Image (cartoon, helix red, strand yellow):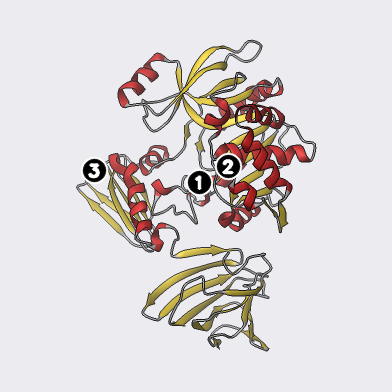
């Protein structure tokens, strides 16, 4: 059985903590591990588990690779989507990749950003689903509903699937997100289950059903994978063919049309953590029902979720609020309106505000930088370079840079010269000078960069050499 992790989401409803270039699957929301790490770790202990594959946005590739390395899964396969085309094509890429090396083991399809508390129940449901998949069925997991939720689609169970566990049923039908009145009827009937977005089936069976109901997806995914290029640890599928692929979810493209769908019920403390209120529900709370993370003081407050990253937050006499503080943003919302946070993100994108897409701290394959301050014709960054890592050999048309080493050792290429700098030493990079920064040491290199010039955007980088395979626009 091969875990296939879908990591293409942008997590806009968890703004400002989650942003499109560093969305919720890469955040530590419910434990010390990130969401994608938790997803991968909970597959341990299952029978017959092979190395996982991750399908992700090309902009997230280095973050995915680093988070896999942190939990000892550096050999996992990573397929890069040049554009998002929803779940049906993403899963088709994984299926085609497995079959290309003669592997028709069942694929366990898991979104990267879900919470599951009862791992034992989760494993038991997967073992049932695997038996069904080996018999040729396409299995989805139906979550036993704990409340009449309007934010989830539902699956209505049909008759019991003979020959398997009593938790396996034929699928009667899939239904869209209901109104609250209809959701109440669904839950009270006992016949409807939340649609989890998790699946298990053999690659050959999925492709056969997809080809029957939406053959263009298979056609363009096959061509895109045939022309894929190896890029370091990644498989970069062909952009031209993948852009021509129809965009569709697995539910619409296959599961609602196939006659081979089964549902295995799952009651394991599942949540898709699709909003701040959902995160509050799965988080630890104090005696007043508050979830308080960071430096928070509460007086006469109930039912609040407060996340303080950098400063003290004090709340007095308030109920059912969500307050989230990051380096560059503060969000305050009523807990029953948090689904509308995505409207704020849309507004910020319309205004071309960077807070919609990136954090003040931006991760790169070599480490990260934190934009400390900026103004007219200047910007100050704190840069941390991992041991053995290096920035690209590059040049800027519009800015000069001053580097001051705070700790560690820097090997600096500045035009035709190479210099070693240590703590409290500095150098100056003129506009148009070819330069490079490396960390030859065994501890992180930390420095302060002061940029000055007429334009300070990240796209003013001309790369000549890059060990991570990035272009100037990447």
Q: Which residue is mark 2?
A: 6
Residue depicted at x 48% and y 28%: 195
Q: Is residue 173 left or right of residue 319?
A: right
Mark 2: give few (<14), some (14-19) or many (20+) Cα within 10 Å. Answer: many
Residue 408: image location, x then y, percent: 60, 77
Mark 3: give few (<14), some (14-19) or many (20+) Cα within 10 Å. Answer: some
Q: Is residue 448 left or right of residue 136?
A: left
Residue 259's label in the rendered image is none
Looking at the picture, does residue 364 appear above or below residue 69? Answer: below
Q: Earlier in the sequence, mark 2 or mark 3?
A: 2
Residue 164: image location, x then y, percent: 64, 14
Residue nearest the observer in this picture, 36 or 343: 343
Residue depicted at x 69% and y 21%: 136
Residue 254: image location, x then y, percent: 58, 28
- Secondary structure beneath dot 1 equals loop
Q: Nearer the viewer, mark 2 or mark 3?
A: 2
Residue 216 appears in the figure: yes
Is the Cβ of the residue at disc 1 closer than 8 Å to that at disc 2?
yes
Q: Is residue 104 left or right of residue 272?
A: right
- Secondary structure beneath dot 2 equals strand
Separation of residues labelled 2 and 3 (CA atoms): 36 Å
Q: Which residue is mark 3?
A: 319
Q: Earlier in the sequence, mark 1 or mark 3?
A: 1
Q: Which residue is mark 1?
A: 9
- Secondary structure beneath dot 3 equals loop
Residue depicted at x 59% and y 20%: 262
Q: Is residue 195 left or right of residue 445?
A: left
């Amino acid at each position: 059985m091969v875990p296939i992790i879908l990591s293409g989401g942008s997590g806009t409803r968890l703004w400002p903590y989650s942003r499109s270039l560093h969305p919720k699957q890469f955040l530590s929301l419910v434990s010390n591990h990130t969401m994608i790490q938790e997803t991968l770790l909970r597959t341990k202990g299952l029978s017959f588990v092979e190395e996982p594959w991750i399908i992700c946005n090309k902009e997230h590739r280095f973050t995915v690779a680093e988070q896999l390395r942190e939990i000892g899964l550096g050999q996992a396969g990573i397929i890069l989507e040049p554009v998002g085309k929803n779940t049906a094509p993403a899963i088709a890429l994984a299926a085609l990749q497995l079959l290309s090396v003669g592997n028709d083991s069942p694929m366990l399809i898991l979104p990267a950003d879900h919470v599951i508390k009862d791992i034992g129940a989760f494993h038991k449901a997967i073992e049932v689903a695997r038996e069904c998949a080996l018999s040729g069925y396409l299995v989805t997991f139906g979550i036993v509903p704990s409340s009449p939720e309007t934010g989830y689609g539902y699956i209505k169970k049909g008759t019991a699937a003979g020959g398997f566990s009593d938790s396996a049923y034929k699928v009667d039908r899939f239904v869209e997100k209901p109104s609250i009145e209809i959701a109440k009827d669904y839950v009270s009937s006992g016949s409807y289950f939340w649609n989890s977005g998790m699946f298990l089936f053999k690659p050959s069976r999925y492709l056969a059903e997809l080809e029957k109901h939406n053959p263009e997806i298979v056609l363009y995914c096959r061509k895109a994978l045939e022309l894929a290029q190896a890029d370091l640890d990644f498989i970069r599928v062909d952009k031209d063919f993948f852009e021509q692929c129809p965009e569709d979810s697995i539910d619409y493209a296959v599961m609602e049309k196939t006659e081979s769908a089964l549902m295995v019920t799952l009651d394991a403390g599942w949540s898709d953590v699709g909003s701040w209120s959902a995160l509050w529900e799965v988080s630890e709370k104090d005696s007043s029902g508050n979830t308080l993370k960071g430096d928070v003081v509460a007086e006469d407050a109930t039912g609040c979720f407060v996340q303080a990253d950098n400063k003290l937050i004090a709340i007095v006499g308030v109920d059912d609020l969500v307050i989230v503080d990051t380096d560059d943003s503060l969000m305050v919302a009523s807990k029953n309106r948090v689904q509308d946070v995505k409207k704020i993100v849309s507004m910020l994108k319309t205004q071309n505000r960077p807070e919609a897409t990136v954090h003040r701290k931006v991760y790169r394959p070599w480490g990260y930088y934190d934009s400390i301050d900026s103004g007219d014709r200047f910007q100050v960054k704190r840069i941390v370079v991992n041991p053995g890592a290096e920035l690209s050999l590059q040049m800027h048309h519009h800015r000069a840079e001053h580097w001051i080493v705070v700790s560690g050792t820097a090997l600096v290429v500045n035009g035709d010269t190479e210099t070693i700098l240590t703590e409290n030493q500095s150098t100056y990079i003129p506009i148009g000078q070819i330069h490079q920064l490396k960390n030859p040491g065994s501890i992180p290199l930390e420095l302060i960069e002061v940029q000055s010039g007429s334009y300070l955007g990240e796209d003013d980088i001309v790369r000549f050499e890059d060990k991570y395979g990035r272009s100037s626009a990447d």
